[in-house]
Image (cartoon, rainbow, N blue to C red):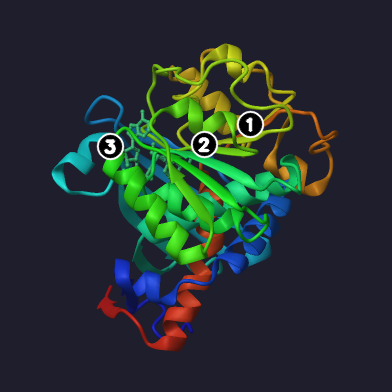
Amino acid sequence: MTDHLGEKILYLSQSDVAAAGPPMAEIITTLEHAFRERGEGRVEMPSKIGIHTMPDAFLHAMPASIPGQNAAGMKWVGGYPRNRDRGLPYVTGLLILNDPATGLPLALMDCTWITAKRTGAATAVSAKYLARPDSDAAGFLGCGVQARSNLEALLEIFRLRKIYAYDTHPERSSSYASEISELYGIEALPVPDPRAAVVNADIVVTAGPILRQPHATIQKGWLREGGFASLVDFDSYWHPAALHQADKFCTDDVPQLQHYRGVGYFQDIPRVHADLGELVTGSKPGRGSREERTIACNLGIALEDIAIAPLVYQRALQKELGAWLRL
Ligand SMILES: NC(=O)c1ccc[n+]([C@@H]2O[C@H](COP(=O)([O-])OP(=O)(O)OC[C@H]3O[C@@H](n4cnc5c(N)ncnc54)[C@H](O)[C@@H]3O)[C@@H](O)[C@H]2O)c1
């Protein structure tokens, strides 16, 4: 594995990463372990720093070291809401994987596949602790990359039978619904308004654009009793009164949430019950009754990416994928 240490690095393109990527079940298990490491204080991960070249766009630096997974590195990721209109992906970027023993770079890889999959997996880990185990209907608002990976991950844990899909571009919710019903053999309905994707669902995933000023479409009372929501697009979709209805409001990382609050996001959210490390280690309880409304507002943190990158790297080596670049 370290034959080329200090001489060459492995470059993995988007398609190399996808070809090398582990299955979703392994991503979920690996992430849960990484969150346990975090919850027990064994992960080094400063809050993201970023630059902002346009309103509501970001370029973030996300380093982490997870000694228990022999994983160290950094993701440099961009999120640009208007890219879709130019035929470009919303989220793009690169990840550098380092050798924890020497600090030397091992690999440079496209990060879009990992970002998509690990975000879905983080929803699934949260849902394992916060959603009703018999949840069988889910609503997706924003039918892009995240709606696909979040559903894939949730299906590893829940027997979902009915999916409601809403997108401001109706052709996107229609193609999403037909794609997933063919792929997974479940009933999927495109719906004409956001309310219809929320009120009938046990699990709601909002995955539209992240906005500093929430559009606050989802109102108090829409998320049903016993429901769970994953706020992939932060609080952008939610009216504060709807968020304050949650019995348990959780996140993946409290310091990261505080950091975002300091730069103008999340100005009216409930008190945080627990972060994902605390839920996984059991130091804070997950769902306590069938009636509770629970919310996970996972911000997407570096440990999620850096936990998965070594799996991609190892599998790429085994499959002889990628191109070697001289240092
Ligand atoms: N929390 C995290 O860890 C994390 C990680 C990655 C991405 N994200 C965020 O997830 C969101 C989705 O990312 P993606 O890669 O799936 O983007 P995408 O462009 O593939 O999909 C976004 C979809 O949302 C639709 N949309 C736009 N406004 C909408 C609205 N008001 N209601 C419903 N649909 C709307 C678009 O038409 C598009 O189909 C982005 O905000 C991104 O920043 C969060």
- The reply to whether discs 1 and 2 touch (Cβ–Cβ < 8 Å) is no
Q: Which residue is mark 3?
A: 169
Judged from the image, the secondary structure of the residue bearing numbered disc 2 is: loop
* Residue bearing the label numbered 1: 254
Q: Quadrant of residue 90?
A: top left
Q: Secondary structure at mark 3?
A: loop
Question: Residue 221 is drawn in which quadrant?
Answer: top right
In front: label 3 or label 1: 3
- Out of 34 and 199, give the one closest to the viewer: 199
Q: On the rendered image, what quadrant is the C terminus found in?
A: bottom left
Give the label on residue 47, or none. 2
Cβ of mark 3 under 8 Å from ligand 1: the answer is yes
Density class for disc 2 (Cα within 10 Å; few <14, some 14-19, many ≥20) is many
Amino acid at circle 2: Ser
* 2 or 3: tag closer to the N-terminus: 2
The answer to whether residue 61 is above or below residue 233 is below
Mark 1 and mark 2 lie on one chain; the one further toward the N terminus is: 2
Q: Which mark identifies residue 67?
A: none
Whether residue 76 sits left or right of residue 243 in the image: it is left
Question: Which residue shows up at 60% across the image and 58% down it?
Answer: 155
Q: Residues within 10 Å of mark 1 (few under 14, many from 20)?
A: some
Of tags 1 and 2, the one toward the viewer is 1
The correct choice, above or below, for 53 with respect to 218 in the image is below
Q: Position of residue 114 (x, y in %)?
A: 44, 59
User: Closer to the observer: label 2 or label 3?
Assistant: 3
In the rendered structure, the answer to whether residue 47 lies left or right of residue 69 reads left
